[in-house]
């Protein structure tokens, strides 16, 4: 890119140069710039930010640690979709982790049945969300039954007290 300070101005050129050199993704010790991602034909930088958000929560040391330790299930979170997963594949590709098809290799590594068990990320995320919804429903039902039992106990106590008070007034 031609960054002419005569045409653009020195401050604009400096800002653009800083932007080019500044990492947009940090995974532990590994840093990636826009130029790195452009070499992997990845230009969705919002998706890249989603990767960093999840990796910070998981306290990932570097890209290799991510590949070896973190399951795809960890990425089934809100605002992380198939495009972010593709950007993660670009990260693996840039670091040379996972061979010729790094996403498939990573997925198979953390799957119970290896490469035969690969499903789409959408399917995985749908399954995780359905399980979370079932857990939420079960917790709600449990709470409802405990609330009902507490109401019954309170009702019984109130009736017993009322009977005792009526009995005391009668004597």
Image: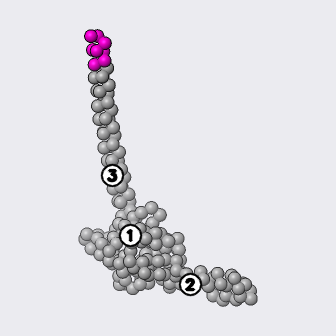
Indicate the quadrant containing the N terminus: top left, top right, bottom left or bottom right. bottom right
Q: Does the magenta stretch include residue 92?
A: no
Residue 168 sits in which quadrant?
top left
- Choose the circle earlier in sequence order: 2 or 3: 2
Write down the residue under mark 3: 135
Write down the residue under mark 2: 21
Q: Which of 133 and 149 is in front in this view?
A: 149
Q: Residues within 10 Å of mark 2 (few under 14, many from 20)?
A: few
Contact between marks 1 and 2 (CB within 8 A): the answer is no
Residue found at the far left of this picture = 113
Q: Distance between the residues labelled 1 and 2?
A: 26 Å
Where is residue 80 shown, x and y percent of the image? 45, 66
* Tag of residue 58: 1
Q: Where does the magenta region start and end?
A: 164-171
**Total numbered badges shown on the rendered structure:** 3
**Magenta stretch, overall SS:** helix
Q: What element carries label 1?
A: helix
Where is residue 153 shown, x and y percent of the image? 29, 31
Residue shown at the point (49%, 77%) measured from the top left: 25
Q: What element carries label 3?
A: helix
Where is residue 79 shown, x and y percent of the image? 47, 63
Contact between marks 1 and 3 (CB within 8 A): the answer is no
Contact between marks 2 and 3 (CB within 8 A): the answer is no
Task: Tell me the mark number nearer the camera, choosing from 1 and 3.
Answer: 1
Residue shown at the point (32%, 25%) measured from the top left: 158
Q: Is residue 5 left or right of residue 69?
A: right
Q: Colour scheme in the image?
A: one colour
Q: How far apart are marks 2 and 3 (CA)?
A: 45 Å
Where is residue 159 shown, x and y percent of the image? 30, 22
Residue 116 visible to an observer of this rendering: no
Q: Residues within 10 Å of mark 1 (few under 14, many from 20)?
A: few
Task: Tell me the mark number nearer the camera, choosing from 2 and 3.
Answer: 2
């Amino acid at each position: 890119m031609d960054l002419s300070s005569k045409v653009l101005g020195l401050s604009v050129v400096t800002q653009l140069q800083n932007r080019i050199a500044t990492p947009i993704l940090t995974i532990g010790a590994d840093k990636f710039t826009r130029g790195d991602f452009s070499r992997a034909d990845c230009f969705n930088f919002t998706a890249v930010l989603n990767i960093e958000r999840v990796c910070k929560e998981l306290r990932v040391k570097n890209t290799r640690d991510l590949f070896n330790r973190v399951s795809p299930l960890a990425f089934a979170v809100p605002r992380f979709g198939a495009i972010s997963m593709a950007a993660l594949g670009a990260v693996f590709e840039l670091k040379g982790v996972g061979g010729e098809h790094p996403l498939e290799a990573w997925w198979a590594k953390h799957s119970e049945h290896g490469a035969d068990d690969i499903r789409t990320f959408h399917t995985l995320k749908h399954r995780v969300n359905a399980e979370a919804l079932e857990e939420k429903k079960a917790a709600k039902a449990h709470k409802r039954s405990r609330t009902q039992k507490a109401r019954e106990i309170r009702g019984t106590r109130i009736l017993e007290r009322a009977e005792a008070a009526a009995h005391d007034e009668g004597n």
